[in-house]
Image: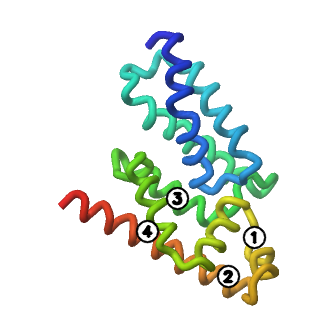
Amino acid sequence: MQRGDFTKIVLEHQGRIRTFIRMLGAAPDAVDDLAQDAFVIAYERLEMLEDIDQAGPWLRSIARNLVRNEARKSTRRRRVVNTSLTDVMLGLADEPDSDAWTEEWFAALKVCLEKLPQHGRALVDGRYQQGQNASQLADQTDMTPAAVRQALSRFRGLLRQCVETRFQQAGG
């Protein structure tokens, strides 16, 4: 792999890596730092990448390890929003060559998000895009923090089921 190819890799994958890191549960203000760290590591190890077409999975692997390290350190400082969600998402991300984390997966997730009721989209957005906790979301709604957590759990399940259904329909 040529060093000159690295610019192409960064331009092609920087948005997806940021989204991937955020989806793993990194705090919004830590996403850029973690993405930058992933690209620095990738640059230092560029000779390990044999096929530029495999740059996406390789970068996600680096980013996944960075987020996993952050989750381990989360008791000392908070760059991961929800460690339990991050554990689940890291488990999904460990599945080799699965359909998760492809552009099609993100497109399916976007379509499925649009299918949620408006209050569900607002809760998911508040939690995973804005990094608000259950108490903050409860203050903005007529819900208790426990009800917010329960609703978010239900909406995550609906999103996962929707994405899986879309992939099953597309594949078969």
Residue shown at 41%/46% (left/top)?
Answer: 102
Are the residues flagged by discs 3 and 1 in contact, CB closer than 8 Å?
A: no
User: Separation of disc 3 and disc 4 at Cα?
Assistant: 11 Å
Q: Nearer the viewer, mark 3 or mark 1?
A: 1
Q: To which quarter of the image does residue 122 belong? A: bottom right
Identify the mark nearer the N-term, 3 or 2: 3
Report the residue marked by disc 4: 160
At label 2, the amino acid type is Val
Report the residue marked by disc 2: 148
Residue 165 position within the rendered picture, expressed as x and y whole percent measured from the top left: 32, 68
Residue 12, placed above or below residue 89:
above
Residue shown at 26%/64% (left/top)?
Answer: 168
Are the residues flagged by discs 3 and 2 in contact, CB closer than 8 Å?
A: no
Seen in the image, is 28 located left or right of residue 164? right
Q: Secondary structure at mark 3?
A: helix
Report the residue marked by disc 1: 133
Identify the mark nearer the N-term, 2 or 4: 2
